[in-house]
Amino acid sequence: EKKITVPDLRGRKVSQGGDAIAMVTAYDYTMARLVDDAGVDAILVGDSLGMVVQGLSNTIPVTLEEIAYHGRAVQRAGVRAHVVGDLPFMSYQVSVAQAVESSGRLMKEGLFESVKLEGGLEFAEHVYRLVRSGIPVMGHIGLLPQTVHALGGFKVQGRGDEAEQKLIADARAIEQAGAYAIVLEAIPPDVAARVTAEVGIPTIGIGAGAACDGQVLVCTDLLGLTSGKAPKFAKRFTNLGEQAVRAVAEYVAEVREGTFPSAQHSYKPNRAAGERSVI
Ligand code: KIV
Ligand code: NA
């Protein structure tokens, strides 16, 4: 099947007849294969891997090397979906040059077809320079997990007139800088609808209602693999976590009972039962 490209995704504005974009995170080969077989349009190697894979309480410690490591595993799956690499905390905030160097390092290794960075107006110059360097950029506004300490927690953003106006200004600035799509995270659905109407590039929501031009979810949330308290928007489409615990518990029981492995999961014996060695 034909690879999904940046121009394909940029054209997916629902108001202009485009099909909504379905994006999901993946951090390894196996998950990338599964979500690609399911027909997702885009795979994000998100810095959420810090929480999902590494067990951290936020995404701040994640490094560019770790994004590259997981990117390599995903890249080997040879997916049809577009693959986006997340720029982690302090891999682009320092300067426009740092953003280009970090992104260039990922792109040059052939891991990703675009990068994503958190930030609005304040990062429009970074986006501009990246795009002019040949690196497609997906923006990300609203709740920015890399700023969790400044925010005082993971909270809904864009409440109130001023915050709503700022979000619209952020989205416009990122679009004007040349981004091909923007993630809207944790904002009221009517605000997301307004932002979506104000820009010509697709918006991809997570906790931002159904009026966006697409949606993104963390793969382990979607599959019901994440334990503990999940955000309101993290719909579990199945409960693989419970199924996994049940399966492993069965394995444990069969090992203790000696019913696993049976003949079916063992190699053919050297001698048939009752046959004795001549020596
Ligand atoms: O890292 C991530 O998974 C993300 C998505 C939630 C958009 O940035
Ligand atoms: Na992220």
Image: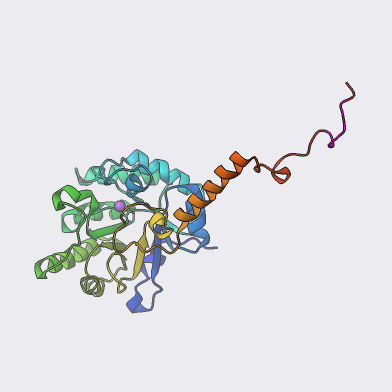
Farthest residue to the left: give it. Answer: 162
State left or right for residue 161 relative to residue 55.
left
- Give the quarter of the image for residue 91: top left
State left or right for residue 153 relative to residue 8.
left
138 above or below 260? below
Residue under the point 26% across and 58% down: 140
- Rendered location of residue 4, percent (x, y): 45, 62
32 above or below 262? below
Residue under the point 56% across and 48% down: 250
Q: Main secondary structure of the magenta part?
A: loop
- Rendered location of residue 216, percent (x, y): 36, 62
Residue 248 vs residue 151, the one in the foreground: 248
Farthest residue to the right: give it. Answer: 278
Residue under the point 39% across and 42% down: 68
- Rendered location of residue 259, percent (x, y): 66, 43
State left or right for residue 209 relative to residue 34.
left
**Which region is colored magenta?**
271-277
**Location of the N terminus (image quadrant):** bottom right
- Rendered location of residue 201, percent (x, y): 30, 68
Residue 245 vs residue 88, the one in the foreground: 245
Residue 109 visible in this rendered orientation of the protein: no
